[in-house]
Amino acid sequence: METAALTGRTVELETLTHHFGVGHYIKALPLKRGDVVVQHKHNSDHVSVLVRGTVTLLVGSVATRHVGPCGLLIRAGEHHGIRAETDALWLCVHDTTGLEQKDIDSQLILDGSNSADMKQVAQELTP
């Protein structure tokens, strides 16, 4: 079961949707109010899109509040996490130019990003 490092509520694999296009991969994550999701560190910058709702975004040690719709740039190598202040729809958009679909996770996620850092982000986002 894929849980997207979620605390508070388990997101079943069926609630996440994966979309592949020419040169792009999008992970769509529907959130319920109070959900906390900690993302991996990534090898390259990527865009996240808050389609609807309100979230608190924590990047490194900086927390910011965002109301959708809006787009946000997440820099490479940064642990990031979100807390849904309302029901929300969050998209992660990655450039996959030249990557095979089967290699996307191994090429986008930094080694060691599922570590104590992710637990720290979750703790900081959990009220």
Image (spheres, rainbow, N blue to C red):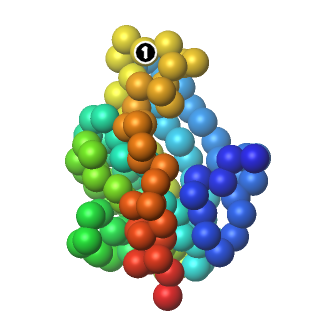
Amino acid found under the numbered disc labelled 1: Leu
On the rendered structure, is 7 left or right of 85?
A: right
State whether residue 67 appears in this view. Answer: no
Asked which quadrant contains residue 118, the reply is bottom left
* Position of residue 80 in the picture relative to residue 76 (left or right): right
Q: Is residue 102 visible?
A: yes
Q: Count every numbered label the image shows and give the total.
A: 1
Residue at 27 percent of width and 46 percent of height: 77
Hey, which quadrant is residue 31 in on the image?
Answer: bottom right
Q: Position of residue 109 (x, y in %)?
A: 42, 36
Indicate the secondary structure of the residue bearing disc 1.
loop
**Residue 80 image offset from top left, x and y in percent:** 36, 59
Q: Residue at x 53, y 42 (%)?
A: 27
Establish if 33 lies above or below 95.
Answer: below
* Rendered position, 43 above or below 68: above
| Quarter of the rendering containing residue 11 | bottom right
Asked whether, in this view, residue 63 is left or right of residue 85, the answer is left
Q: Which residue is mark 1?
A: 99
Q: Position of residue 91 (x, y in %)?
A: 47, 49
Q: Is residue 101 left or right of residue 95?
A: right
User: How far from the left and from the top, in percent, is residue 125?
Assistant: 44, 77
For the residue pair 30 and 7, the one nearer the viewer reads as 7
Q: Nearer the viewer, residue 91 or 121?
A: 121
Q: Nearer the viewer, residue 6 or 91?
A: 6
Residue shown at the point (25%, 43%) measured from the top left: 76
The residue most toward the bottom is: 127
Identify the residue at horizontal 35%, vertical 56% (top origin). 79
For disc 1, the neighbor class at 10 Å (few under 14, some 14 to 19, many from 20) is: few
